[in-house]
Amino acid sequence: MDIHQNTDKKRISAIARFLFLSRWLQLPLYLGLVLAQCIYVFHFWVELTDLMGAIMGDKDALQHILHSVSPEDDDAPLKITETAIMLVVLGLIDVVMISNLLIMVIIGGYETFVSRMNLQGHPDQPEWLSHVNASVLKIKLATAIIGISSIHLLKTFINASAYDEKTLIAQTAIHITFLLSAVAIAYTDRLMASTLQSRTESGH
């Protein structure tokens, strides 16, 4: 009887070990996100170079900037304006925020779901990584998405003349939806934490 029980335990242990090792299948996904990060870095420098070229009088760079700001306005005068500079800078900030989101997903996701990085005591360890878990990661991702949505909405409002009323209303509604979703996630996690704490206290 004991032999059969030990055999079953070993079999379950082997299956559990195999399933646990399957977490490494996520590694190629995080490596792919690193490549996406490289693409965003390249895109950032292309946009920044075009902006600098437009300011210095490069007509091709200026045309590219104006087309990216107002793609449907072909009759726009070929000159850089404060609004165009502001929209390009907001676009650069948008790229940086998306890049930050990628970093949180790559590092936080790897630390939470794949393997510990053992960065304790490292001078460059991100402050949020010391207490990261699936719940904290969800809230931070929701906050980052709201920030990205805010930048997109600000770009739309600054260049509102290039959009119709339905587009403005739709983008505003989407942003509000993101806000409500983040509040709901934070509230749900707070309820779960309170319930867990109550059960722990009642167990003592």
Image (spheres, rainbow, N blue to C red):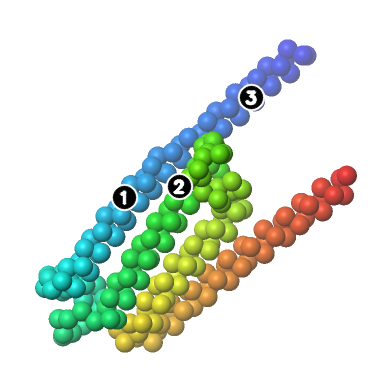
**Residue at 21 percent of width and 68 percent of height:** 52
Q: Earlier in the sequence, mark 1 or mark 3?
A: 3
Residue drawn at x 12%, y 71% as measured from the top left: 58
Q: Could you tell me which secondary element the residue under label 1 belongs to?
A: helix
Q: Tag on residue 106?
A: 2
Disc assigned to residue 29: none
Q: What residue would you read off at disc 1?
A: 38
Position of residue 116 measured from the top left corner of the image (x, y, whole percent): 54, 37
Instruction: Note whether residue 45 is visible.
Output: yes
Q: Which residue is mark 3?
A: 13
Label 3 amino acid?
Ser
Residue furthest left in the image: 59
Q: Position of residue 175 (x, y in %)?
A: 49, 74
Specify which label sits upstream in the sequence, 1 or 2: 1
Tell me how far mark 2 sits from mark 3, CA to CA: 29 Å
| Disc 1 from disc 2: Cα separation | 13 Å
Q: Residues within 10 Å of mark 2 (few under 14, many from 20)?
A: many
Tell me which label, 2 or 3, sits earlier in the chain: 3
Quadrant of the snapshot with the C terminus = top right
Nearer the observer, 85 or 39: 85
Nearer the observer: mark 1 or 3; the answer is 1
**SS of the residue under disc 2:** helix
